[in-house]
Amino acid sequence: MAGFSYFPHTEDDLRVMLERIGVASLDDLYQDVPERFVFRGEYDLPDAMSEQQVRDYFESLAAQNARLKIFAGAGAYDHYTPAVVPYITSRSEFLTAYTPYQAEISQGTLRYIFEYQSMVCTLTGMDVSNASLYDGPTAAAEAMKMALACTKKKTRVLLSRTLLPHVIRVVETYARFHGVELGYIDARDGQTSLESLQKELEAGDVAGIIVPQINRYGIIEDLGGFEEAVHAAKAVAIAYCDPSALAVIKTPGEWGFDIAVGDGQPLGIPVSFGGPYVGFMACRKDYVRKMPGRIVGQTTDADGKRCYVLTLQAREQHIRREKATSNICSNESLMALYVTVYLSLMGPKGLRKVNCLSYGGAHYLHDELLKTGKFEEVFTKPFLKEFVLKPLVDTEKLQQKLYEGGFFAALSTEEGYVSFCVTEKRSKEEIDALVALVKEV
Amino acid sequence: MSKVIEGLLYSESHEWVKVEGDIAVIGVSDFAQKEMGDITYVDAPEVEDEVTAGEEFGALESVKASSDLYSPVSGEVVEVNEALEDQPELINSDAYGAWIIKVKMSDTSELDALMDAAAYQALTEK
Amino acid sequence: MKYYDKLIFELSKPGRQGFTLPENGYGRCVKELPEGLRRQSEPELPEVSEPDVVRHYTNLSQMNFGVDTGFYPLGSCTMKYNPKVNEEVAAMPGFTGLHPLQPGVDGAKAVIEGLDKALSAITGMARFTFEPCAGAHGELTGLMIMRSYHMRRGDLARTKVIVPDSAHGTNPASAAVCGLEVVEVKSNAAGLVDVEDLKPLLGPDIAGIMMTNPNTLGLFEREIGEIAALVHACGGLLYYDGANMNPMLGVVRPGDMGFDIMHLNLHKTFSTPHGGGGPGSGPVGVAAHLADLLPTIQVSGFHGNFGVMLRAYAYILMLGRQNVKLAGKYATVSANYIKESLKDVYKLPIPTVCKHEFVFDGLVDDGAREGREGATTLDVAKRLLDFGFHAPTIYFPLLFHQALMIEPTETESLETLDAFIDVMRKIAAEAAEDPAILKEAPHGAPIRRPDETTAARQPILKYQDA
């Protein structure tokens, strides 16, 4: 038999092993598999390739993708990833470890998760954070379940219609099967309507609400009055946030909210065709035992040395099985490391600057686009880095023109608007080039 | 050997009941606390919650386990032992002193289904 | 490994910075935003230089044990070697720079289609969805498909799902999230699903059964043919938990055993790194009659963990037709070799041939004597750390009190297996002689055993609370 580089087994090795086991062949180890189930065919797979062939193949596939200047967001934001981030996260001690069940030889993972939790707490203004969830939309779905667990005899969760579409779709999927009744809070002038919320709360059956802090139109929502209304109805207030923006905009904690969720992707994680990203969740201290996912805590070892462990595990599936707060097991630990290293590099000043550059670029683009006469303003509310306009030209022609010019911009929304997003990665020259193309449409 | 106290009533799921008029004081037995090991959290109901005989009313947690608490009687929770919130270890040090909830019983005949000390002792020695 | 004591926050000094960003030439900034929408205080993030960051996280990494560090026989986790070409492929800018909603993604689509075809060929399923981000997420998605199938037929009475008592904890938890009631089926003395116990559970309220095959004891459920016939006859579907798919490579396809829905853990069977607990990927495959249900269920934001899919596809292409089918048998021979080499000193509750993993139930002689407590499975696990091995999975499955679950995978050499066996025998001898040395272990790790009770009683969950 031919060798293969990942398998150390030689003919001699196999003979030694089979002898010890007391069987004649590898096939004898499968005598308990009924003959009718044994796969006797050949897998419909290509022949083995050399490493160079594999690399060449993927390079050819990568070359079939368009490399575009990204001027769109909608839940995935093209912020700059400093070189240190992939460098550190590709260290094999982090990359090839499993979940840190053996704390004594997993202090690296446990320590960065503790740092990550601390950073998520300070960004959101919340008391406690978990060690990560899959992505933003699933974090919102977990928060929906958590609202029900934190309230008694309540059956309904309200979603703002201004949440990003993919967040609504995933929460709806979970609700449909988990048996949660959803209600919707209407939008008014591009922002979640407090009047609509108050009306929905009247029924007294609402366990929680999920509203975005920066919504599907890019608008920074004014959540004044929300906390009071929700808490008067003994419900839980959940904010869906862009964590990068939280360095400069009012936090869920400052708004008096109970749970903050969102996607950590804008914090140093490449857009990567949608994943892997990382969902975050933070909450008020008194809800910690209802929180899904792993949590790391600080303690001391037998010699009194400071150390870190997985804690409050009695909430989790491996202990409580069907009564667990969630089914989540593997989460997105390495992506939490991306976030932690990124935030360590940026610090409060860097993250503020990222927001200022994004804000400056987005407002410049917004104003320049309006000047072309090809768009109309839809909303006049404050925005940060993302905004929508109503196109006065054929949307498909506009998109095609920009695509051919090397841009991904003017993403269509469900409402018939087009959205734009600018991060610190985009230069003024790129913005000018985009606007010049728009003028030609 | 775990301690069993005379004068209390016991359930098969290892809760004890001390009857004070129409109030049932409820905790877990010494046997149960030993089985759990170091208790790290007591998940108790709130005052005014209703509990039902044979149904869950909370849970005990240790580092590696969680054990549901079953109410031996039905009624309304009138008091919760708040000391356990910060000091769950009180159950480990004195299982019969560290009561968990007090319930105003709606049907005292449910007590007839519980064991006396001797019967419970026999159960734990099986 | 050496102990390093700092948190990144403790290196912080105002005025230091680890970032470089262009100057703001727009003349506009966030302070234009209305006061009421702005954050009032600066976030408490560290202010550190770039070399500080690199050294800090390098120091942290050196307190970690990964597959690249040493043997990692963690049962049910399939800690096989993570090939490095996978990492190169996943880091190609032509993939990492793609926005999930952008046009011009033919190459990315070809990756997904190619992986779908390869996994379908390996499992005998018709089609996969790649949205689930981990195994448990796949289970949940699979159960949603199961329920959708019944709902579509207007059969709303099927609200229960059968789960074996040996199942991974995620199975019942996923069922609960999916709104299904869990009915447990017992294992028999041979460690397999008890068909006689199963029969009375089957009825018009059963949506289906979740099975892991080989199961968590590493045993092949040889009565799967009869089980499939019974479950299908009652109108239910069969779900295959692919956590233990590795030993089936090249031998059995779940589709051929009668499974309708399954998930794979790309971070187990298909060699993608576990990353300290994710990102994983839990694609769900279905039989042809369920394929049209896949687009009706969106369980994550975009297309799933594409970066993980790239790695798995690179792995399959490297191995090719010839080598994929060897992985399973090599994993199985390695597990059986360890089992046979240690069964005289560790209790083997079920002495049959295993697949990729097996379970011991503690030591034959744990050293317990008059007035002396014996060594437990936890003690054995901690002592292993002193010898440069990761511990096996412990106290799972719940069927045995001292469970020690060992899975070597196909990427470990005979010399590594022998070294592990020698150490396990040495530990057994130490236990018989004096269990204290095990109870005090580990002696050589960066820390000794942590106080988990205090951690849970008085949680300190962030730097600001410490």
Image: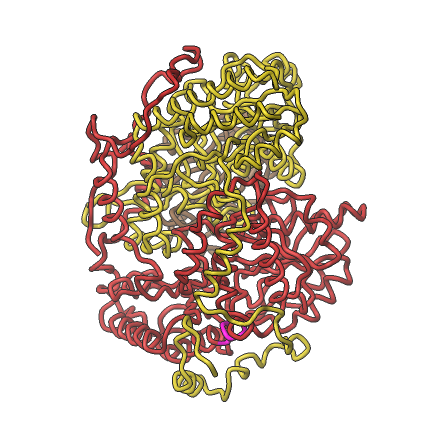
Horizontal side of A286 relative to A191 (left or right) equals left
Horizontal side of A256 relative to A32 (left or right) equals left
Magenta region, main secondary structure? helix
Colour that chain C carries in the picture: red
> Can residue B16 be seen here?
no
Q: Which residues fall within the magenta stretch?
A: C325-329
Q: Against A312, is A238 above or below?
A: above
Residue C429: percent from left, percent from top: 26, 75
Horizontal side of B81 relative to A31 (left or right) equals left
Residue C409: percent from left, percent from top: 43, 69
Residue A110: percent from left, percent from top: 32, 46
Colour that chain B carries in the picture: brown
Judged from this view, the residue extending furthest toward the front is A440
Say which of C119 and C362 sits in front. Answer: C119
Q: Against C221, is A373 above or below?
A: above
As for residue C300 lying within the magenta part, the answer is no
Say which of A362 and A246 sits in front. Answer: A362
